Image (cartoon, rainbow, N blue to C red):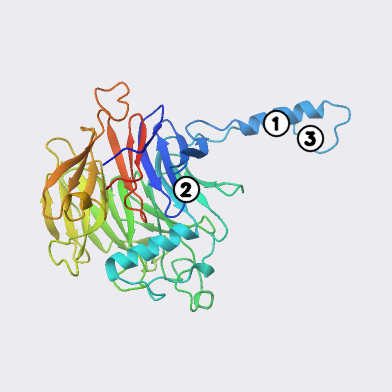
Amino acid sequence: MDLKAFRPTKEKVKVVEFHAVQPWLAMADVGGAVSIWDWESQQVVMETQLGVADEGPLQDAMLQRLAEKEPQYWGSQLSASMTPPKSVAAGPVRDLRFLDTQTCFWQLALGQSLQHGATTSQGIPHLGRVRGIKGRRWLVIACETKIVFQDLMGGPSKEVPRSIMDGRPSTRIAFTFIHSPSLLGLNEADAAGTSMVTPVMAVGTASGTIYLISVASLQLVARLVGQKSSINALMSIAGKEPGAPEWLISGAADGSMAVWDLSKAPQGADREIAPRHLLPRAHEGPILSMTLFQSVIDTPENPPVRLLTTGDDKKVAAWDLWTWAESARSKPMPKGFATSVVASPRGGAALGAEPPLLMVGDEYAVVFAMFPGGSSMPIANLENVIPAGAKKFPKLYQIAVHPLQPHVVAVGSNTGVSSSPEVWD
C-alpha cells in the first residue's frame, strides 16, 4: 500500500467522502472547515468555513448604509432600526454527501449489482424523471444546527434549518429512493408509471429519530421512530427484489440497530414509521460504522451479502441480510476499536487473498485488513509516512474507498487526509 498524496489540515479530519464519478474527495475537519480536493491534480476545488456565524448580511447592510449617505443614491433604504442578524453558526460538521444524477445512478446501480446482480432497467430506474436534482450538483453538509446544500455549479446554496428536525442536531445523512407516492405526498396520478420520483434525504439526529426530507421541496415527509439514542451510522441498501424500494439501516449510540422499510406509508397525522426490525443490543456500546460485503468464503460462485458493524465494545459483527441473524463476531484489533470500516473489492489482490474489509482505529497509525475467514492483519503503517502533529504517531479516524475505482483509498487523520490512488500494485 503506497501513499501517493497527502493534503495537510490544521484540525482533525473525521469525515471523508468520494464522489462516484468526478476525481473529488470531500473532507471536513473538527473546526468546521470543508473542502473538496481533486486527488488526480491535487488541487482544491472548493473551500468553505462552516464553524462560525456568517457576517455577510451585516457587511452588506453596512455597505448599503454608506451608499445611502451619498447624494446620488436612489432606491429603497434600510430601516434605521433594522440590524440584520448574522446567520446561525453551523456548528461541527457531522457528515458529508455528494448529491447529483451521477451519484444517484451509481448508488442504485452498485446496490442492485451487489445484491441481485441486476444491470437492467428493471433494477435501475431511468433517472430522467427524477425531480429536484436534474442539472444540479451539491455537496450536502450535515452540521449541528443546520444542513447546508452547497451548490457546486455556481448557483445559490440552500439550507435545511434544525427546526425541521424538531430542533434536534443532525448527526448522519443518507439518500434513498422509495416508490410509495403517499410517503412523498403525491397522488397516484402524479406517480403513475414512475418508480422513482425524488431522492429523499434521511437525517439521523442526536435524539434517535430519523427525519425523511424531500430533496425537491426540503419539506419533512415522515419520521422514523424507534431508537432512543444518537444515530451514529446510516446507510441505504437495495430492496429484497430487483427494482424494489431501498431500505435504510441505522446504528445508534446505545448499541441498537434498526432496519427500516421506507415503502410503508406513514399512518396518522404525525406521519411516523416504526422499524421493520430492531436489534436493541447489536453491540454492547455505541455502533460506530457499517458496510456491506460479500462473504466469498461461504459460496465463492454466488457469495451472500452481509452487513458488518463495528462498535466501541471492540467487536465487529456480521449480519445476514433480511433475516438479520448474527453470523459472526470477532475482535480484529489487538487493542482499541475500529472507528471506520469499508469493503475493499481490490484489497488483498497483491497478497493473493480474498477481498477484505479495511478498517482504522485511533489507537493506531495502521490500516487493518479483515478477511472473510475472520483473520486480520495490518497492511499499511502510516506512522513514518504522514505527519504526527502533536501526537506520538498519526491518529486515523475514517477510511473511504472509491465506489468505482476501488484501488483508490483515502484516510482521514489528525493532520490531514492521505490518498492512495494506486493502493494495490
Q: Which residue lies furthest to the right in this view?
A: 71
Residue 226 falls in image quadrant:
bottom left
What residue type is disc 1 on? Ala
At mark 3, the secondary structure is loop
Q: Is residue 287 above or below residue 307?
A: above
- Left or right of 260: which side holds 378? left
How many badges with numbers are in the image? 3
Q: Is residue 422 above or below residue 226?
A: above
x 35%, y 65%: residue: 246
- Left or right of 288: which side holds 150? right
Q: Residue under circle 1?
A: 61
Q: Residue under circle 2?
A: 140
What residue type is disc 3 on? Gln
Q: How crowded is mark 1: few (under 14 residues within 10 Å), some or many (20 or more)?
A: some
- Label 2 to label 1: alpha-carbon separation: 28 Å
Report if residue 279 is visible in the image: yes
Observer-nearest of 314 and 105: 105
Report if residue 271 is visible in the image: no
Q: Residue under circle 3?
A: 77
- Left or right of 54: which side holds 247? left
